[in-house]
Amino acid sequence: MSVLSLPIREVQAPALQHLRAYPVDAFLIDSSHGTGRLLDLEQATAFYKELREVTGLPGGVAGGFTPDNVQARVRMFRRMVGEDFSTDMETGACTGGQFNPRKAARYVRGARREFS
């Protein structure tokens, strides 16, 4: 799957039309790019909806998702956008800068519970 990662920012509608030209299967709104900075879900909602409308592609969000907050954040964003979406987690699965499989497994279990 090919995914286009986009930061949240003010983008004019004509510029969004050019996104259709990208050969991707989905988009990802990412506020942190691996820094763990928390995504502002309210700010992401309008951008997500606009991207869905313009591109017709499935979407996802990233930024500050952890095993401890994934269920609440998925529940909240799903209510805001009115549909399922994907999530991304990088630093939330790390301990001391190293990948932690136990944290990743907890994250997946929490996300699955909320998406079920």
Image (tube, rainbow, N blue to C red):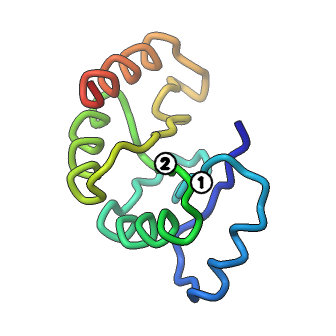
Q: CA separation, marks 1 and 2?
A: 6 Å
Determine whether 14 is above or below 9 in the image.
below
Residue 42 versus residue 26: which sits nearer the camera?
26
Look at the numbered disc 2 and give the secondary structure of its residue. strand
Looking at this view, name the residue that lies furthest to the front.
56
**Amino acid at dot 2:** Gly
Label 1 element class = strand
Q: Residue at x 40, y 21 (%)?
A: 108
30 relative to 116, above or below: below
Compared to residue 54, the image places residue 76 above or below, namely: above
Q: Residue at x 51, y 39 (%)?
A: 88
- Picture quadrant where residue 16 is located: bottom right
Disc 2 target residue: 60
Image coordinates for residue 49, horizontal then vertical, percent = 41, 67
Q: Toward the viewer: 89 or 6?
A: 6
User: What is the total number of numbered labels drawn onto the structure image?
Assistant: 2
Whichever of callouts 1 and 2 sits on the residue coming sooner in the sequence is 1
- Residue of label 1: 27
Where residue 54 sits, quadrant-wise, is bottom right
